[in-house]
Amino acid sequence: MPSVAVFDLGGVLLDWNPRHLYRKLFSDPQEMEHFLATVTTSQWHGVQDHGGDPVESTRRLQAANPGQETLIAAFYDRFDEMCDHAFPEMADLVERLHGAGTPLYLLSNAPGFLDNWLRGPAQVRHPFLGHFRDYVVSGTVGCAKPGPDIYNLVCRTGRFRPADAVFIDDVAANAEGAQSVGMSAVHHRSADETTRALRAMGLPA
């Protein structure tokens, strides 16, 4: 039975969404959606999750989209504003696990600079994030979910065996990746379902 809980960040603990930022920068929702779909695309920012340089990537995108330089710069300059909203029921779950002494770790596909944010400013905005013993961010460590290396890395970081941990992620392929190295996994769809799944595994959720 697992005794360690490893959580994904965006989509599980925080409602990471560029719209939280860009609603402040666009008056027309349709223009915002067009910008997100055609300029700061998921393919573009996904490169930074795999170790790409946000500064250089921003410069290249600005050069390809004259007239939109300020909007493009905001993506990484104001990235924390995309992370303003926690899921309250998941924050409560983390609080309960921490209060019961469960070792907690965080494993996220994200640009490397998020590592420093998690270790400082994020804990002011979202105090429950301070309960994690360590953080593994793909853009910092050079490997990403659902590849096996990053799961093995979080286990080495926490000095626990894969069989001792359960990983919670809202992407099914990422949960399956954890299972492939011997971890238990929960495909997160709701706080209630995840809580029930962890309790069924014997964790004090």
Image (cartoon, rainbow, N blue to C red):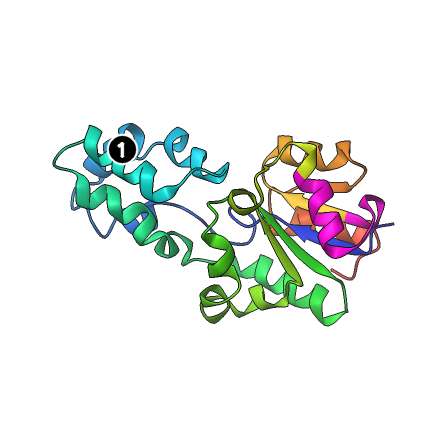
Residue under the point 42% across and 54% down = 83
- The question of residue 169 being in magenta is answered with no
Residue 42 visible, this orientation: yes
Q: Is residue 4 above or below residue 130?
A: above
Secondary structure mostly seen in the magenta stretch: helix
Quadrant in the rendering for residue 93: bottom right
Magenta residues?
Answer: 150-165
Quadrant in the rendering for residue 54: top left
Residue under the point 40% across and 29% down = 43
Q: Residue furthest right?
A: 1
* Residue 189 x/y as whole percent: 60, 42
Residue under the point 40% across and 46% down = 17
Please tell me whether mark 1 sits on a helix, a strand or a loop: helix
Q: Is residue 102 left or right of residue 127?
A: right
Q: Is residue 26 above or below residue 145?
A: below
Badge 1 density bin: few <14, some 14–19, many ≥20, Cα 10 Å: few
Residue under the point 22% across and 40% down = 29
- The question of residue 155 being in magenta is answered with yes
* Residue 49 x/y as whole percent: 48, 39
